[in-house]
Amino acid sequence: MSDNPTPPRPAPEPTPVAAQDQSTRRDKQTRQDRQDRQPSRDRQTPPDRQTQDRQPPPDKSAAQGKNAARDRSATKDKGAAQDKSAPRDGARQDRSAPQDRSAPRDKSAPRDKGAESPARPPRRRRPRFSVERGWFPPLGSKGKVALVVSVLTGLLTHGYHLFRYPLYLTDEGIYMQRAWSVLRETSLSPYTYDYDHAPLGWITLAGWVFPLPKQFETFGNAINTGRFLMLLVHLVSVYLLFEITRRLSGSVLAATIAAFLFNVSPIAVYFQRQVLLDNLMILWLLLSLFMLLRREVTIRSVFGGGMALGIALITKENAIFFVPSFMYLLYRRVKGSASHRFTSTLWPFAAFAPIGAYVTYALLKNELLPSGFDFDLNNPPADHVSLLYTLWWQLNRSQGTLFSHTGLLQTSWLVRDKYLLIAGVCAMLISLWIGMHDRKRNLGFLISGTLAFGYAFYLVRGSVVLDFYVTPLIPMLAINVGMVIDRMLTGSFANRFMRGAHSMTRVALPSFVALLLLASPASGYLVHTNTEGHTQIADQYQSKINLTGMQHAQIAWVRKHVPPNSRIIMDDDLWGDLHDVRPFYPYAHSHWNASSDPDVRDKLFRKKWQNVDYIIMSNKMRKSMDTNNSDGRENWILQALRNSTRVWSQTQGNIKLEIYRVQ
């Protein structure tokens, strides 16, 4: 604004009488026309325009000034000139300034020559990416193509050869056995349920089987039916993993790399095809993480994320090692919001709801606490099982270390895919370093690093670890590898010289590495070197390999030569075939239940080897019997094996199946 005072408004000069009469007639005609048009204009114009229409007509001095300028009969008079120039000049110079349209304009007010239009405030650029605030880049057309390709790749790698490889394993039979019990007997297990695992996993399997036309035999047998569900679970998990990685990193390339490893890694294909509770747990964990990474943290997303995490916990208890990362992500997402207290309380409530239902079930059956509140591991409760006692027993189990030459790391995991495991651990450490270096900007790296680190700590802590326990670690390592590779490519090719080829290089280099992994026999991703030194398609895609066909042949021999009333010791992988398909074998039980369940051990076999008719040996059953016999509970079964004759055997590679008739 200018410091000069506003000059006084000049008095209008007298106009001729004829001009006044003419102006008066025009004003009357104008007011009459406005009154005639008023109803229609009120119906069609918005309230702001209606306010303008209701303003009183311009004063006579303004009209006189306009008439004088139009007729050009009067001399140049300052009042009329200012009436005409003030609104035009003001509009020309300050069009961007906000105006109150409802207020009448004073066209006769003089314009201040020293006045300047207010400066337009600089626009604050919105950050392109922020995990904390939910500012994720859009997926785009290229991202949609990459997502579709990732899902189709998962369908091919996990669906092809699904019912032939790998061999049916013990735990697959156990989970389908318990799903059979839920559906056929409305109980959690055909034997005494000892709370070794939370039950929601096989309840989910029973819910999947129930609407199928042939139920457990829809896809050939019970385990095949469960494996088809694992394929569907994997496809949904691929979508969730892709979106989670993209939102944690802001990059489609990182999501594509993570999905590629999750689909093609041999260790991923081997374990994710099997009917395992770990695969169902991964689905619920990824869904919970996906809900927390939505653009807006709403009550629905917080409640859904908490419920998904609670379902994961009562599907497989080791999901608890992911909880700290979830809690920190929720804290960062709701920090500073108006509803942060409510959402911070709602999430743990929703997560605890499924767990509370499980605890309530044990409480109603009087199986929550052991008898006399005795947690002595050397004297397990004899009158009833206990949820808390079983948890205490599992926490105190120990089985050496993973890093020994006989541990699973050397004998099982690195053999199947050393590239993903080694690169994943290195990427996890890099993600932790990047995330801790700047926790505000690199929240995605911090979350991905802690997710992998928390579960890796569970594996190396020294307790009992089975080979498929590594399954939940695979997607977390894949996320870290994808994000770190994307960050390295972004940092390496950001200089001016390589800027032109930047986008092409970021795609070409990972594609070259992927082709190298697929084509190299040493990786085992697509081809491998067999025992004869020849390069061939990997076992998971080899059509000539039919491992499960050996088990079908074993069952066929039993049905042809063994009477249905025979007392049989076997492994759990055959349980569904012998109990759900006619003729039924009601006295066929696994060596674990025959040695531990009182109803089977003391009433049917009476702990005497003479009461055993046949022993059906799976591939690793003898090793499992020796491991389970630390307290001598399976001595009578081993004695029956020593007093038996082999009547059937089949071998393929290092896999050997046998059937023995006890003398």
Image: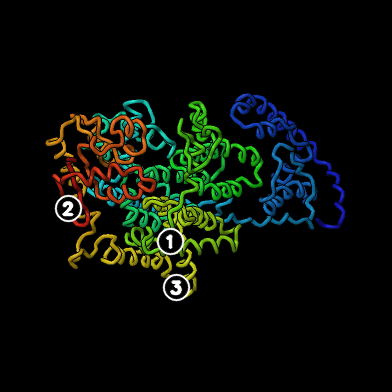
Which mark is drawn over residue 498? 3
- What is the three-letter code of the residue carrying label 3? Met
Q: Are marks 3 and 2 in contact (CB under 8 Å)?
A: no
The picture quadrant where one finds residue 231 is top left
Considering every residue shown, the one lying at the far left of the view is 560
Q: Nearer the viewer, mark 1 or mark 3?
A: 1
| Circle 2 residue | 651
Residue where numbered disc 1 is placed: 424
Three-letter amino acid code of the residue under disc 1? Gly
Tell me the CA gap for discs 1 and 3.
28 Å
Helix, strand or loop at disc 2? strand
- Judging depth in this view, the residue of 492 and 366 nearest the camera is 366
At which x and y percent is residue 248?
50, 54
Q: Is residue 166 above or below residue 558?
A: below
- In the picture as drawn, the residue positioned furthest to the bottom comes out as 497
Residue 339 spot, x, y in % from top left: 64, 39
Disc 3 to disc 2, C-alpha distance: 57 Å
Look at the image and tell me whether residue 144 can be seen.
no
Local crowd at mark 3 within 10 Å, few (<14), some, or many (≥20)? few
User: Is residue 586 shown to the viewer in this render?
Assistant: yes
Q: Residues within 10 Å of mark 2 (few under 14, many from 20)?
A: few
Q: What amino acid is labelled 2 in the image?
A: Thr
Image side of residue 472 versus residue 58, left or right: left
Q: Residues within 10 Å of mark 1 (few under 14, many from 20)?
A: many
Q: Earlier in the sequence, mark 3 or mark 2?
A: 3
> At which x and y percent is residue 207?
35, 31
Q: Residue at x 69, y 49 (%)?
A: 97
**Is residue 38 placed above or below 418 in the rendered structure?**
above
